[in-house]
Image: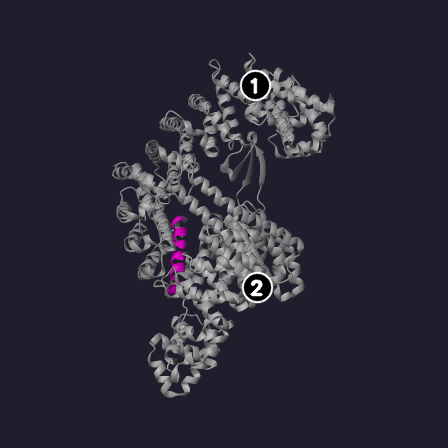
């Protein structure tokens, strides 16, 4: 008994508001063995004399214990003990008088059952099913509640018996949803029904069977909202999110109900927003289904706009110097976000016609709130209505600019907001068409001294405008822009000193940075105008409230330095570095959330780009804080629905629902900084190469585990990018060190290719892996690696085919429409991009291992053959052929044993309607001639006329065809050069010369010039012509090649070409004749070639 009393005391202390007491108690609680915990907790729950809060705490702890440590504790208990627990729980539910505790015990029972369903779906606690059936039919309301609560909490409770009990489950839910006497039971039953639907979201037969429960659920949504309970409405949002198809038979009724609730101002803001959320979520999860109900969507648009008008008059607004975060529960923010999402979900074709009239009326309303909402609505729909708005951009922009001089400051603010948003959404068209009007309107608005908040927003819009503005468009305005910014900066610096206000200054500093970033070297004349003041801010703005200003100024200085270049910046570089270093040494005193940290980290990387190798000296100071930031470990937690209710998202936590009543939470603070820091490490490795070698080891140890950092895509991308760069840095330490480092990364990279969920990140990881193999070469993969890689690539190819089938199936769906087709096209492009990376990896393996790797490749052979079947999409055929091109290029003569699979398709593809396929095929013929060996001779002969036909086609040089044509020209050249017996060289050569030079495909151009040099050096009569009469033509080819950078000074053939020209120079007459046909650019090119070679 004494032990139990002590345990009660411990439970009370676990709830203590005093942190020290609570921490100590948690430590004590953790030392109690699991079995004893269960005994104590159960006793506490069953003890009628114990205080309610003690029993409540015990119930929560027991549920958590079963949830987190079931496997460690429960199987080790004796059978008697296990049975006793089950009996105690059921007895407690039946006898407990407090509804609150009874609910908590039901949660424990549900948690225990969840863990007692074995792998085959057998429920090891059959008594609880009997208990459910008895309770739901009981006269005791408390028991009926308990049964529904358990079923709501764990709808999978029937395990593999579910099908058998289907009718019973349905009957039980319907009966409870119709319980006229007890509204609470009706609500619970509706939630339980929703929970059951959600847990069976992919079982379409079941969803159909339960469709007739939806009207009851909707009725309950309506009733419960007016009782102040939004739990059923939240369930409806979840259904819209995960099982939208369930709503289809009653979609009209669902939408009507949500509209009605959203429009009812007697309900709370939260409830109205949730009702709107159902419609908006459907626009994202079931857009095609919703597009069939445009009338209702059209009615929901004015609701969103009405919410956006729900603003407060606030006298202080325009002078506020700290920007508060938007009030996320406010109707105005919710309405704006809903509009943005529904426009993106349903597309502009549907939304713009619905909203245009409303916005126009709002903008003419005498009440500022309507004008403000109208402008904010325009900003919100820009992304979703992109195409449709682009067509009428002229009229929109002219109209919006009028509001930059509206009488009300908050309307002027909204006008700046719309301009800034459009500058981003419609770049660079927006900048090209409206630069003049927009720049002058923004500069004028920035002079609104009496409304700093408006000034700052105009500066922010200017940043958006210049960020995406082509340099040539900005230059004419540079002078006026810079003078304005300088005047405002000077006056705001005075204000900072006199009044301590900084909001506008923060934005103006970034505007200057953005202008410099776009203007690049054209900013040089203004450098001295700004740099002294900027350095002054960094030196003196040391107070805590000026941290953001100081960070932005550091960013501005480094961007200006990068823009004007090393020469102009050098005199200040060392002073700036000292300033940064000073912040850096005080870095340890900076708080973790100090905004300066990420600005500093990015500024260092820019300084590294400016200073190049000279930056190395600063690494010892920079790397400490950078590694610290890159090593941030986020706080994470696994929570179940009950815990979730006590935590809200606004204290920096974000949650992912894992289903089965569990959520995964992560505290997002520091994640962006971590990603930036990782990106900067990549930058150092790239810029400094061997100068970074001292740090490669610690960076590799940090980066390799981050390939699995699933909380942030950017971190994984940086980790992948860093791998080949770090190997390059480490080269100077010799092969042994390099191999050790590669062994440390290789496994993790291969595994990451197998497990990465995001396709953009996956392509980066595959690309990095391919680069590493090219760097490390033959022998870098052992048998296990090969086995694992083979399995993964096979999986990727199989998935590629499966996804194509799934997309075909979606085209048969009843909701298929042109917007669905657009989405499918995007998915298709993603898939093809992964296919290109599979090809990259195979390329790197073939080029490193040559024919040794063919036996391994055979496991993929049939899948690659499938890619080049004539009925596959062109991209499949293109990449399938590229893979076989690599086999021929790197694995010949052995490659011929697979010829039966690819030769016919390759020859047929030379005349394919898709230029990409023709290009891959032509490249293949070229490598066949160069590397393939004797067996390929007849096929080279057969290919020549096919390729000539492609080259001579009338549109062969059009933009889309030129690359394929140039590959054909190069391949014809390779056949004549390496397999002259396969072609009638004398007949083809004059034609071939007339096709030169190649301007687009620089790699193939080099091959053609090499061959041309061979021909000239051997005095080939056909090429030189009688009495060297072809030389002017040859000069022209060479001059164009140099001018187009198809010949680079580092290529071996540039020396040979220069030689040819020297020989002609000797004969004055011939020289004049050759040069006289060239224009100025071509003559300069010939001169350059002579000077550099």
Q: Within the image, what quadrant is residue 822 found in?
A: top left
Give whichever of 525, 627 is nearer the camera.
Answer: 627
Badge 2 or badge 1: first in the primary sequence: 1
Return the x and y of residue 294 as percentages of the image width and height: 34, 34
The answer to whether 98 appears left or right of 455 in the picture is: right
Q: Considering only vertical position in the picture, is 865 above or below 385? A: below
Return the x and y of residue 654 as percentages of the image width and height: 51, 39
Q: Determine which residue is flagged by label 2.
A: 890
Q: Determine which residue is flagged by label 1.
A: 99
Q: Residues within 10 Å of mark 1 (few under 14, many from 20)?
A: few
The answer to whether 910 appears left or right of 164 in the picture is: left
Dominant secondary structure (helix, strand or loop) of the stretch shown in magenta: helix
Judged from the image, the secondary structure of the residue bearing numbered disc 1 is helix
Q: Measuring 66% from the left and 18% from the top, which residue is drawn there?
A: 47
> Magenta stretch?
503-523
Tell me if residue 509 is in the magenta stretch.
yes
Q: Considering only vertical position in the picture, is 856 above or below 270? A: below
Number of callouts: 2
The quadrant the N terminus occupies is top right
């Amino acid at each position: 008994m004494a032990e139990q009393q002590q345990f009660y005391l411990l439970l009370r202390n676990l709830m203590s508001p005093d942190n020290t007491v609570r921490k100590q108690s948690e430590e004590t609680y953790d030392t109690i063995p699991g079995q004893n915990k269960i005994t104590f907790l159960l006793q506490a729950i069953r003890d009628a004399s114990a205080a309610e809060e003690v029993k409540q705490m015990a119930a929560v702890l027991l549920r958590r214990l079963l949830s987190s440590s079931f496997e460690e504790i429960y199987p080790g208990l004796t059978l008697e003990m296990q049975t006793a627990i089950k009996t105690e729980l059921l007895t407690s539910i039946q006898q407990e008088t407090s509804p609150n505790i009874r609910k908590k015990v039901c949660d424990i029972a549900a948690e225990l059952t969840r863990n007692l369903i074995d792998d085959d779906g057998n429920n090891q606690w059959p008594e609880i099913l009997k208990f459910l059936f008895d309770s739901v039919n009981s006269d005791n309301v408390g028991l009926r509640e308990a049964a529904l609560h358990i079923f709501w909490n764990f709808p999978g409770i029937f395990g593999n018996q579910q099908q058998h009990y289907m009718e019973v489950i349905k009957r039980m839910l319907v009966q409870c949803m119709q319980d006229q006497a007890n509204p609470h039971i009706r609500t619970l039953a509706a939630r339980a029904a929703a929970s059951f639907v959600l847990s069976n979201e992919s079982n379409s037969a079941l969803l159909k069977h339960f469709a007739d429960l939806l009207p009851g659920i909707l009725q309950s949504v309506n009733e419960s909202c007016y009782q102040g309970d939004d739990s059923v409405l939240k369930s409806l949002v979840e259904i819209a999110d995960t099982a939208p198809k369930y709503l289809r038979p009653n979609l009209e009724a669902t939408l009507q109900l949500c509209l009605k609730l959203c429009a009812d101002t007697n309900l709370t803001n939260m409830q109205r927003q949730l009702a709107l959320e159902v419609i908006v979520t459907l626009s994202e999860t079931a857009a095609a289904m919703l597009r069939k109900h445009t009338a209702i969507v059209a009615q929901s648009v004015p609701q969103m706009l009405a919410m956006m008008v729900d603003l407060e008059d606030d006298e202080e607004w325009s002078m506020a110097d700290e920007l508060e975060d938007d009030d996320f529960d406010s109707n105005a923010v919710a309405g704006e976000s809903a509009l943005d999402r529904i426009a993106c979900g349903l597309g502009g074709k549907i939304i713009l016609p619905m909203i245009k009239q409303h916005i126009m009326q709002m903008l003419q309303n005498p009440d500022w709130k309507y004008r403000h909402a109208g402008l904010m609505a325009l900003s919100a729909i820009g992304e979703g209505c992109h195409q449709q708005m682009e067509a009428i951009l002229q009229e929109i922009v002219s109209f919006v600019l009028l509001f930059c001089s509206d009488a009300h400051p908050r309307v002027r603010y909204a006008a700046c907001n719309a301009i800034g948003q459009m500058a981003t959404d419609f770049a660079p068209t927006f900048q090209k068409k409206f630069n003049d009007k927009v720049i002058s309107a923004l500069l004028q608005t920035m002079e609104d001294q009496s409304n700093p908040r408006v000034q700052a927003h105009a500066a922010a819009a200017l940043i958006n405008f210049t960020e995406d503005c082509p340099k040539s468009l900005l230059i004419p305005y540079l002078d006026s822009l810079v003078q304005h910014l300088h005047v405002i900066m000077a006056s705001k610096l005075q204000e900072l000193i006199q009044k301590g206000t900084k909001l506008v200054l923060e934005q103006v500093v970034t505007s200057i940075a953005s202008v410099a970033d776009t203007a690049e070297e054209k900013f040089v004349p203004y450098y001295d105008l700004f740099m002294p003041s900027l350095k002054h801010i960094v030196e003196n703005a040391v107070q805590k409230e000026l941290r953001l200003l100081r960070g932005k100024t550091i960013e501005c200085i480094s961007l200006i330095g990068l823009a004007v270049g090393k020469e102009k910046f050098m005199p200040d570089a060392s002073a700036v570095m000292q300033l940064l270093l000073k912040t850096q040494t005080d870095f340890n005193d900076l708080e973790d959330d100090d905004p300066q940290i990420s600005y500093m980290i990015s500024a260092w990387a820019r300084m590294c780009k400016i200073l190049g190798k000279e930056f190395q000296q600063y690494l010892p100071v920079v790397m400490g804080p950078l590694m610290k930031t890159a090593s941030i470990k986020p706080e994470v937690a696994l929570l179940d629905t009950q815990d979730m209710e006590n935590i809200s998202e606004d204290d920096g936590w974000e949650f992912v629902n894992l289903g089965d009543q569990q959520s995964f939470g992560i505290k997002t603070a520091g994640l962006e900084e971590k990603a930036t820091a990782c990106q900067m490490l990549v930058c150092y490795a790239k810029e400094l190469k061997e100068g970074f070698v001292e740090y490669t080891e610690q960076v590799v140890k940090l980066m390799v585990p981050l390939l699995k950092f699933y909380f942030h895509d950017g971190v994984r991308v940086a980790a992948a990018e860093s791998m080949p760069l770090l190997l390059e840095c480490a080269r100077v330490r010799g092969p042994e060190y390099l191999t050790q480092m590669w062994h440390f990364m290789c496994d993790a990279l291969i595994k990451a290719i197998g497990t990465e969920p995001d396709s953009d990140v996956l392509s980066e990881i595959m690309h990095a892996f391919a680069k590493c193999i090219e760097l490390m070469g033959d022998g870098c993969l052992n048998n296990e690696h090969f086995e694992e890689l083979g399995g993964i690539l096979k999986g990727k190819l199989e998935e590629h085919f499966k996804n194509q089938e799934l997309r075909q199936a979606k085209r048969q769906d009843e909701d298929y429409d042109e917007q669905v087709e657009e989405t499918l096209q995007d998915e298709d492009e993603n898939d093809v991009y992964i296919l290109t990376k599979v090809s990259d990896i195979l390329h790197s393996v073939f080029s490193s291992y040559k024919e040794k790797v063919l036996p391994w490749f055979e496991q993929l052979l049939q899948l690659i053959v499938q890619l080049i079947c004539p009925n596959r999409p062109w991209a499949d055929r293109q990449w399938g052929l590229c893979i076989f091109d690599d086999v021929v290029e790197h694995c010949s003569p052995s490659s011929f044993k697979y010829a039966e699979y690819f030769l016919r398709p390759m020859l047929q593809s030379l005349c394919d309607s898709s230029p990409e396929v023709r290009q891959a095929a032509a490249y293949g013929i070229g490598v066949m001639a160069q590397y393939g060996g004797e067996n390929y001779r007849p096929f080279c002969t057969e290919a020549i006329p096919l390729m000539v036909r492609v080259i001579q086609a009338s549109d062969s040089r059009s933009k889309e065809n030129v690359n394929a044509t140039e590959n054909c020209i190069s391949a014809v050249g390779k056949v004549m050069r390496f397999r002259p017996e396969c072609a009638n060289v004398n007949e083809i050569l004059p034609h071939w010369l007339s096709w030169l030079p190649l301007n687009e495909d620089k790699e193939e151009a080099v091959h053609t010039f090499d061959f041309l040099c061979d021909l000239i050096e051997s005095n080939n009569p056909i090429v030189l012509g009688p009495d060297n009469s072809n030389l002017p033509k040859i000069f022209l080819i060479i001059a164009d090649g140099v001018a187009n950078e198809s010949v680079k000074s580092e290529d071996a053939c540039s020396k040979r070409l220069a030689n040819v020209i020297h020989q002609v120079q000797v004969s004055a007459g011939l020289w004049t004749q050759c040069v006289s046909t060239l224009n100025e650019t071509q003559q300069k090119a010939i001169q350059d070639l002579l000077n550099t070679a």
